[in-house]
Image: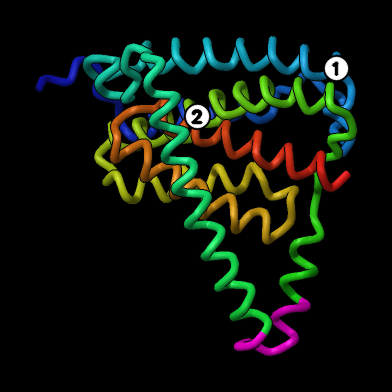
Amino acid sequence: MTLLNKYPLRYACLEILLSYFIVSRISPFDYVGVDLWNFSINHYYYWLYSAFLIIFIIYFAKLTSSYDFRDEFFIPEFKPIFICQAFLIFVKLLIYIFFLLIILCLCILYCFPESLRLWVEAGSSGFMWNIGSKQSLALMVITSLFTGGVEELFYRAFIITKLKQVGVASLIAAFLGSIIFAYGHFYYGFIGFFFALIFGGILSYIYLTHKNIYYSVFVHSFYNIFVSVLLFLLN
């Protein structure tokens, strides 16, 4: 396989920094509060913004591809079966997480000192969205799909592939991409950052194992929808 456009490390880093700035630092919202998604207009703005980001990431990835764009970034032609297969992966993942959380909570309660429990509680008191109506929840389903699309295309397909282009091993590239992904969720607190790091690693594993970005996109989206339903029920 002959590389048509092999970039030096500094060029790959510049491309990642440029795209990271556009994806994470340019926002349609002047202020982001817990009630952001309770206003329908904010969803519409976000959909337009996300559509632009998806087009930008795909075009930029295609522009800087080393050989065949779809093969290199694991973006095959879309098939509806991908949604069903991703949902099955999500259900299995949810079952594993449920049992792991039970084991982790039991360990914190009975196997570790109280100081650790207090530290965990303090670290979990971060940002939490407020989903206050059925209309907001319905709009959040579409918003979750856009969020999954943008974040997986960037943090998984783009960053991991860019690092692999310059010779970084897939495992290290996945780890670095997960750290950047978790950093973008640090406003949830330390526990939110840690969970995002683990979740990012899982999504990277799904992406690299199946060689299909749609699986990680829909698993991510299903997770966001699931969390939105929980937040709605809590409110």
- Which image quadrant for residue 207? top left
- Which image quadrant for residue 214? top left
Q: Give the left or right position of residue 131, taking residue 146 as reference.
A: right
Q: Main secondary structure of the magenta part?
A: helix
Q: Locate the C terminus and report the quarter of the image it occupies.
A: top right
Residue 184 placement (x, y as % from top left): 64, 42
Q: Which residue is mark 1?
A: 40
Residue at disc 1, secondary structure: helix
- Which image quadrant for residue 226? top right
Q: Give the left or right position of residue 33, taking residue 126 as reference.
A: right
- Near-viewer residue (64 or 203): 203
Residue 103 placement (x, y as % from top left): 55, 73
Q: Is residue 134 visible?
A: yes
Q: Give the left or right position of residue 175, taking residue 17 as reference.
A: left
Q: Which mark is residue 218?
A: 2
Query: Would you say residue 113 sits in the magenta stretch?
Result: yes
Q: Does 32 sit above or below residue 79?
A: below
Residue at disc 2, secondary structure: helix
Residue at screen point 81% across, 46% down: 128
Residue 36 placement (x, y as % from top left): 86, 29
Q: Amino acid at mark 2?
A: Phe
Q: Amino acid at mark 1?
A: Ser
Q: How far separated are the C-alphas under marks 2 and 1?
A: 23 Å
Query: Would you say residue 80 sits in the magenta stretch?
Result: no
Ranked by sequence position, the earlier of labels 2 and 1 is 1
- Near-viewer residue (111 or 51): 111
What's the magenta region? 110-118
Residue at screen point 36% across, 45% down: 205
The single residue placed furthest to the left in the displayed view is: 1
